Amino acid sequence: MSAVPVFLGAPAAPRWLPAAAANFADAPAADILAWAVETFGSGLTVACSMQDGVLVDLAVRADPDVEVVFLDTGFHFGETLTTARRMQARYDLNLVTLAPAEGAATYDADGTEACCGARKVAPLERHLAARSAWVTGLRRAESPTRAGAAAVEWDAGRGIVKVNPIVGWSDDDVARHRRPRRHCESLAGQGVRLDRLRALHAAGLGSRRAVGRQRAARVRPPSRQPGRVRAMAFAFPVALEVAGRRCVVFGSGPAARARAAALTDAGAAVDVIDRPYEDGDLAGAFLAVAATGDAAETARIFAEAEREGVLLNAVDDPRHCHFAVPAVLRRGDLTVTVSTGGRAPGYAGRLRDELGRAVGPEYGTLVDLIGAVRAELRAERPAGVGSGSPGTTADFAHWARRWRGALDHDLIGLVREGRTGEARTLLRAALADDDHKEAVA
């Protein structure tokens, strides 16, 4: 009978662990995994036997880049490797294949215990030594010896946290998860005789084919202390064209209605979903808004958005946002936005209102005037004539200076007084030259 190795001097369980275990005792698997990803970051790994894809499917919903570990004993069967390849192709897994050391024990020469120790236990121990938590597919329903397992527990032998997100699942729960996801089907469900495979594996008669490529490692966030929230900077402001694109809004409250109205005004094809989120809701979407007020549901929406390449804004949840929605002031075609990177949206709204008192409708009128003059000068511009060829750095710099000089005039004062014609004449005079050139400033 093999013993679980216990390392002398292994760290004690963290003080917050009992509270976490109690908090997630009856929690959905998605909530447990979302917490594990947020808490442990790159210190988290998912151990998967590849007998089915259930654990992988759940894990990548929480984080598409989560590390998945597959133990390649050197004697896997084709059916197991096919499942691994299917999972890798379906999810573009951040897959780490652990192989035994050269000359590792074999069943024929050294017996079952030595073979498993060298080809399963030892490679996993080496890998977990550099991790702070690992995720398993352990379930209480599988064996009476697992009846006391918890969703979050301390792995004293390894000195790390052990996360068992489906620990409370029955066989029926697993089947329900697999049913709409053919790629998660178990080997047994595919008609594979597991008893035969296990017997052959014990005899060392399995396949020696490799799983295949391992994708290049992606950059993942470092692990962080539990309970600490990282604010995002949203440092690159942009204006998006959403006209005609599918945009999805989750929720039914005021925030959801406001986002849906704004997207509709911008010409988007808006779908409002006021029922609980379901996998696949973001199919074909360009952008989405999560305004459900449910943190766990938002995490699941974010996971699909990451997987499907959909831009997501989560109301009051910056860590699950790809972008922040600023406070907006509109004056015709003039749009002024104020953003605090999601940290103080109320203050952004107040600043927007203060700007609104200073920036009146005359600013929109001036934008219309400038646009009209630009169009006129562009139409009058002889091709290929001017200071530098059109589109060159010299050409742009020349006309950028002209525009800056032209806009130094008190055009807004003239428009505010109703003297729009004079403002047009002044602007054209400041911009026009012998070539009638203009540039986009």
Image (cartoon, rainbow, N blue to C red):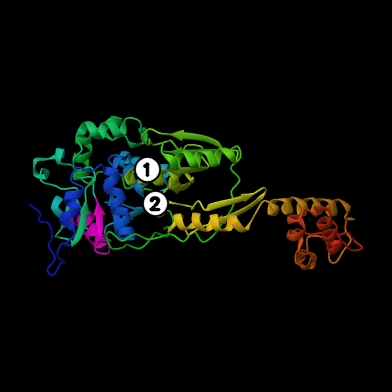
Mark 1 residue type: Met
Residue matched to label 2: 317
Q: Are marks 2 and 1 in contact (CB under 8 Å)?
A: no
Magenta stretch prevailing secondary structure:
helix
Q: Dot 2: what SS?
A: loop
- For the C terminus, the image quarter is bottom right
Image coords of residue 168 (percent x, y)? 18, 40
Which residue lies under the disc numbered 1? Answer: 87
Mark 1 crowd level (few <14, some 14–19, many ≥20, 10 Å Cα): many
> Which portion, as a residue range, is magenta?
117-135
In the rendered structure, the answer to whether residue 333 lies left or right of residue 134 reads right
Depth check: give the residue in front, 82 or 383. Answer: 383
Q: Is residue 266 left or right of residue 404?
A: left
Q: Residue at 27% of width from left, 57% of height from top? A: 100
Residue sticking out furthest to the left: 1
Residue 402 position, x and y percent, is 80, 66
